[in-house]
Amino acid sequence: MTVTGTAAAGRTFWGFLRPLPVLWFCVFPADFLIVEMEAKIQTVLLNDNVTISCKVPGSTPLNINIMGVIWYRKHQANEAEHKVFEMYGNYQQAFRPGASMSRAGLEKGDVSLHLPGVQLRDAGEYRCKVVVTPEQAQETVFLNVLASPECILFQEQAIVKDDGNKYILCKAHGFYPENIIIIWYTWTQENPQGQEISEGITTGPAIKNEDGTFNITSLLRLGHNVTTCQCMISHISLSTFCRLNFTQFQRGSEMGYAWETTAICIITGIYIVVAAAIIGWIRCFKKRKRLLRRHELPQEKPEELKLGAFTEVHS
């Protein structure tokens, strides 16, 4: 290779190396600033408050005057990303109402995001981006919002349908997500250990409410040999099963229900009280009438005697 060729190659090599320090300064500093999150998925119940953890580890206090934090949320449906909160020095702006960060924790590297009254629309992927000039780092976490069902067993009134059978209604409402399981169990004198009911059950589809939560109902036909039945509801938001019990009992040769027996007792008691009052009033009336007759007889006799005496003298 000639001297001219060597010089040209040298100029090309140094021309390639010249921008490397700039690239090194832009790329590698992210390895020195680290952002940590407690978990990749965080769960919160509807209407609760939540703090999405995001921290910059290290013992050196951060200079918040040259520090910036931006929180983004990517909606799980349309994948669009929007700002939730941002902070640069003394400047702060919340794009989601109520979103905030603790300034006291910033110097210690705590850049966690606080959201009050979480709604279903707050669910999604959150990205925490931290900039400490000239470095930056970021991490993501998925916020999962759940709504626990309110479980109700309508046992105060058994539903009588056109077929003459009696039904009991189990309802779960205000839950999210949609997936839910309702199972009926029964205990009888023949099977005191209990077993799952597979017949006489009608469970409707989940109905969506305006706020995004769901309602569902399950109807059970009551058999004559059933003594105790249970509606068991399972949902991801519940730490344990929601269990609702209903008991019916046999009275004489007929099967009765607790609320029917209570009504019969109350009506019978009313009848007894009313009958006793009527009988007492009749007795009192008769007694008073007899007393009046006794007092009236002596008053009539002197008048007759006086009239007789007067007649005799006159004649």
Image: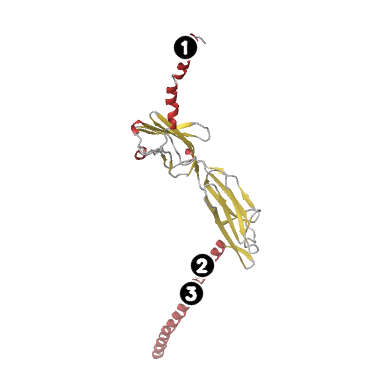
User: Which of the two labelled residues, at mark 2 and mark 1, occupies the earlier sequence position?
Assistant: 1
For disc 3, the marked residue is: 280
Position of residue 121 relative to residue 272, above or below, is above
Q: CA distance from mark 3 to mark 2?
A: 15 Å
Q: Which mark is residue 7?
A: 1
Q: Is residue 160 visible?
A: no
Rendering coords of residue 211 (x, y %) = 50, 41
28 relative to 104 in the view: left or right: right
Q: Which amino acid lies under the numbered mark 3 shown in the image of this protein?
A: Gly
First of labels 3, 2 by sequence position: 2
Residue type at mark 2? Ile
Pointer 3 with pointer 2, Cβ within 8 A = no
According to the image, label 2 marks what residue?
A: 270
Q: Determine whether 305 is above or below 42 in the image.
A: below
Q: Percent x, y for residue 200?
A: 65, 53
x and y percent of residue 73 in the render?
47, 34
